Amino acid sequence: MTFLDTGSLVLHVHASGPEAAPPLVFLNPIGSNLNVWDDTVRKLGHAFRSVQYDLRGQGLSDVPEGEYCLDDHVTDLLDLLDALGLEQVSLVGCSLGGVVAQAFALAHPARVARLVLLDTLPRIGTFESWQARIEQIKAEGLPALAPTLVQRWFAPAFFQEQPAAARGYTALLARSPQTGYLGSCAALRDADLRGRMQALRLPTLVLCGEHDLSTPPDTCQALAEQLGAEFEQIRGAAHLPMVEQPGEVARLLREFLHPTSGTRRYDQGMAVRRQVLGGAHVDRASADTTSLDRDFQTFITEYAWGGPWSRGHLDTRTRHLLTLAVLTALPREHELEMHVRATRNTGVTEDDLREVFLHVAVYAGVPVANRAFQIAKRVLSERNVP
């Protein structure tokens, strides 16, 4: 758990994935916290440096008194990126988080590589509707209204198919800091970016749940058309598709954000290659490259490390276990030795190696498994020498 003092307030932040991977910042809806992105981030795997944070007034971030404005949230995000040393990022924002992402991209376009907007608009609701929400919460309290408000978050089937999760998200909303919720209601009440969106010139993806009542699919599609952006409607979801359909959201994010060719794919592959094999090994391999094998080194960096290893869905440790099993079964002793050395970087333990080799012994034969045990014992003993 990380608490980051940006200079103006303390934000609760969670970062995951390789530090060298493309940075991806997630902004949560009102009345929630950074954990609404957990399943989506998990399914993205290690293709990105994912940064989730609680917006001001939410989760475990500071809860300033009084009304907030959109510029407050934009300043918080700018301070966060500066504190983390992130010069340019892609932003993924839902609802309030999406409004903040739009405003930030308009104010600081050079800091944003790509923009993903989930169930959000330049103007959500009306001044009157948000003011009525503020007055109702002041009168009745957020815990009393949470069961009604959360009905707009999810599709009807969610409450039938995942009743425990529905209760949990109702509790999350009910226990949200009321001061922070009211402050952000004021920010949404006053936020209106409609007259400024023509200035947005960034690659953008707009997503919307098919059952969303707060920002309906037709209005989100109209926003996408205005921006010249891609649009996808997510079936079986309402206002929080990253909770209801995390696999589909992750797939769409990966297709839109993932570097698939050229320099971007090479850079991504090199980042993952360094993460798994270690910087020293990759530096030695790069130094030994000649005109004979330069194209081959580029090929494996782009199409192995920038391909399956960077796809997400399976985490790096799982992919490494699969790789170790295949190299044992074939057998590919030189590559196996290299990957046993790399286990220190991927969380694969000695116990994991034993189970992999035993499994291979059953399905590919005792001799190859026996040789794998010999290689692993030698490599691990050398690695453990002071």
Image: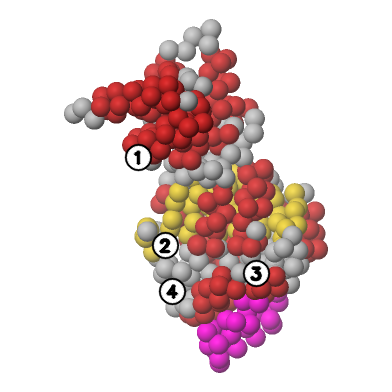
Mark 4 crowdedness (10 Å alpha carbons): few <14, some 14-19, many ≥20:
few
Q: Amino acid at mark 3?
A: Glu
For the residue pair 342 and 324, the one nearer the viewer reads as 324
**Residue 79 circle label:** none
Q: Residue at x 55, y 91 (%)?
A: 140
Mark closest to the chain's N terminus, 1 or 4: 4
**Residue 64 circle label:** 4
Mark closest to the chain's N terminus, 3 or 2: 2
Say which of marks 1 and 4 sits in front: 1
At mark 1, the secondary structure is helix
**Magenta range:** 124-151
Distance CA(mark 3)–CA(mark 2): 31 Å
For the residue pair 110 and 120, the one nearer the viewer reads as 120
Residues marked 3 and 2 touching at CB (< 8 Å) = no
Mark 1 crowdedness (10 Å alpha carbons): few <14, some 14-19, many ≥20:
few
Name above or below for residue 278 compared with residue 245.
Answer: above
At mark 2, the secondary structure is strand
At mark 3, the secondary structure is helix
* Residue ID for mark 1: 351
Residues marked 1 and 2 touching at CB (< 8 Å) = no
**Residue 12 circle label:** 2
Q: Quadrant of the C terminus?
A: top left
Distance CA(mark 1)–CA(mark 4): 49 Å
* Residue ID for mark 3: 161
